[in-house]
Each structure stands twice: as C-alpha cells, then as structure tokens.
C-alpha cells in the first residue's frame, strides 16, 4: 500500500514545530492580556458586589 502526501524533512518539521509553539505563545499572551485589561476596566469593586 503506497502513501500519498507530502514528506517533510527533519529541518522542516523542526521549523513547523517552532512556528506552532510561537503561535501558541502569542495566542496565550493575548488571552492573558485581554483578561488583565478586562479586570482593570471593571475596577476593584468587582469583588465587593452583593451576591
């Protein structure tokens, strides 16, 4: 049975993994940034609300 598809070299796999990690870190950083901005915009009284 023959396999069709693209075969990447070890260097290409290494670069793809590095790009994937960089993209993941960038997305994670944006999530944290948006979370912090949201908390700052809400202000300190967000924890002192009536339940």
Image (spheres, rainbow, N blue to C red):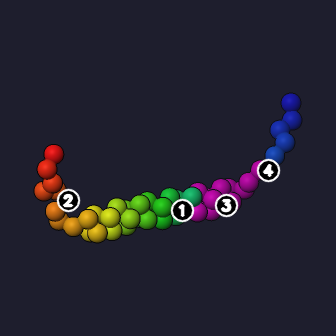
Q: Residue at x 28, y 69 (%)?
A: 41
Work out which quarter of the rendered image holds the C terminus and state it: top left
Residue 23, position in %: x, y?
54, 62
* Camera-side residue of 33 and 6: 33
Upstream in sequence: badge 1 or badge 4: 4
Real-space Cα distance between discs 2 and 4? 53 Å
Q: Secondary structure at mark 3?
A: helix
Quarter of the rendering containing residue 34:
bottom left
Label 3 belongs to which residue?
Answer: 11
Q: Residue at x 63, y 59 (%)?
A: 16
Label 4 belongs to which residue?
Answer: 6
Q: Which mark is residue 46?
A: 2
Real-space Cα distance between discs 2 and 3? 50 Å
Q: Secondary structure at mark 2?
A: helix
Residue found farthest to the right? 2
Per the rendered image, the range of residues in magenta is 6-19
Real-space Cα distance between discs 4 and 3? 14 Å
Q: Is residue 4 left or right of residue 10?
A: right
Real-space Cα distance between discs 3 and 1? 18 Å
Determine whether label 3 and label 1 are within 8 Å by CB.
Answer: no
Real-space Cα distance between discs 1 and 2? 32 Å
* Camera-side residue of 36 and 8: 36
Real-space Cα distance between discs 1 and 4? 22 Å
Which of discs 1 and 2 lies nearer the camera? The answer is 2
Upstream in sequence: badge 4 or badge 3: 4
Determine whether label 1 and label 4 are within 8 Å by CB.
Answer: no
Upstream in sequence: badge 3 or badge 1: 3
Quarter of the rendering containing residue 10:
bottom right
Q: Which mark is residue 23?
A: 1
Q: Residue at x 52, y 64 (%)?
A: 22
Determine whether label 4 and label 3 are within 8 Å by CB.
Answer: no
């Amino acid at each position: 049975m023959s396999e069709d598809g693209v075969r990447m070299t070890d260097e290409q796999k290494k670069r793809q993994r590095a790009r994937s990690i960089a993209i993941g870190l960038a997305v994670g950083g944006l999530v944290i940034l948006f979370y912090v901005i949201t908390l700052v915009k809400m202000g300190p009284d967000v924890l002192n609300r009536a339940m």
